[in-house]
Image (cartoon, rainbow, N blue to C red):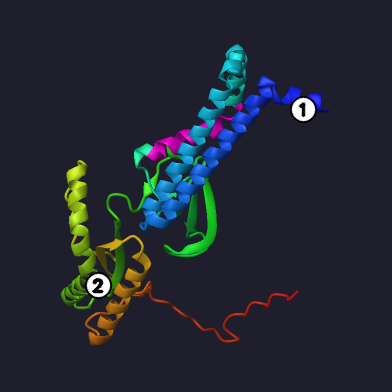
Amino acid sequence: MEEMIMRWLFDPTAGKLIAAFVGVVVVYGVVHALKRSINLHVTDADSRYRARKLVSFLGYVTVIIVIATVFSDRLGGLTVTFGVAGAGIAFALQEVIASVAGWVALSFGNFYRPGDRIQLGGIRGDVIDIGVLRTTLMELGEWVEGDLYNGRIVRVSNSFVLKQPVYNYSADFPFLWDEITFPVRYGSDWRYARAVLQRVADEVIGDYAGQSEGAWKGVVQKYLIEDAKIAPLVTIRPDENWIEFKVRYIVDYRNRRSTKDRIFTRILEEVDRSNNRIQIATAGFELLSAPALRVELFGEGDRPLPEPLPIA
């Protein structure tokens, strides 16, 4: 028994296994210590998250280098075998490889980062984690109307970054343009209605317009894009049913629903104060004219009445 143990201890392969194990344990200990240090000394959540991800990635790379170094003298004769096996593995794991490639693109391409609101692979939500294979989202919408969480956590393959468009609501310009349609009946004071809508929009959106102006100037300088109007805008379009007003404004992407609620509330308050100068239109039908109807009545002796139909 002792001879077998001694033979195993002096076996080169066993020695390499022990060395590789020790190397992996040391790397794991260093990575764990660095993560604890980051949690203690880095206060910014975004910087802390990125630092932990970087340390984990460097730990994986170091483990691969350690194992390859330990067994380097035994890998030379297996080159052809590894090549053939690698081709088969690449074909079988093409989706995994595409996901890893997507993760590399995310790491260096600035598509999105944790905290951004995106739409990826048909799923819309806030990014809460970016892994090597999948991006984790806190989903928005579906059975919940508006930009509100529905409670589902969705993991989307990183390969969609290379296959489909990536919609980012909060990248270089964390604001959105939104519109409200407000129908007014013909006969209302449309000039007064327009002035009221403009005043309400300026009152509610004024802060957003000021905050977003600097961000939009940065976008205009960075990209070849038109210098759009940031201030709220009211437009008018009459049709056959009513006068349609559209209030176009800019809003923080996280507060789109609440801002629309505030605008509608203020508009309805102004309508109540207008003393019928502003009348909200509804989808109704008004009968303007009808053809004349001729009704003839006959007595019993003038014309026989039709026999009643049998009732089944």
Q: Residues within 10 Å of mark 2 (few under 14, many from 20)?
A: some
On screen, 142 above or below 205?
A: above
Q: Residues within 10 Å of mark 1 (few under 14, many from 20)?
A: few
Helix, strand, or loop for circle 2? helix
Residue denoted by label 1:
5
On screen, 138 above or below 225?
A: below
The quarter of the displayed image where residue 282 is located: bottom left
* Relative to 14, 261 lies left or right: left
Q: Which residues are magenta?
A: 92-107
Distance between mark 1 and mark 2 Cα atoms: 81 Å
Question: What amino acid is at disc 1?
Answer: Ile
The single residue placed furthest to the front in the displayed view is 2
Residue denoted by label 2:
204
Which residue occupies the foreground of this view, 232 or 195?
Answer: 232
Question: What amino acid is at disc 2?
Answer: Val
Q: Position of residue 93 (x, y in %)?
A: 58, 30
* Relative to 71, 238 lies left or right: left
Q: Identify the residue at image location x=56%, y=19%.
A: 72
Q: Which mark is residue 195?
A: none
Q: Quadrant of the C terminus?
A: bottom right
Q: Position of residue 86 (x, y in %)?
A: 58, 21
Question: Do residues under tags 1 and 2 come within 8 Å of each other at their CB atoms?
Answer: no
Based on the picture, tell me whether residue 30 belongs to the magenta stretch.
Answer: no
Q: Quadrant of the N terminus?
A: top right
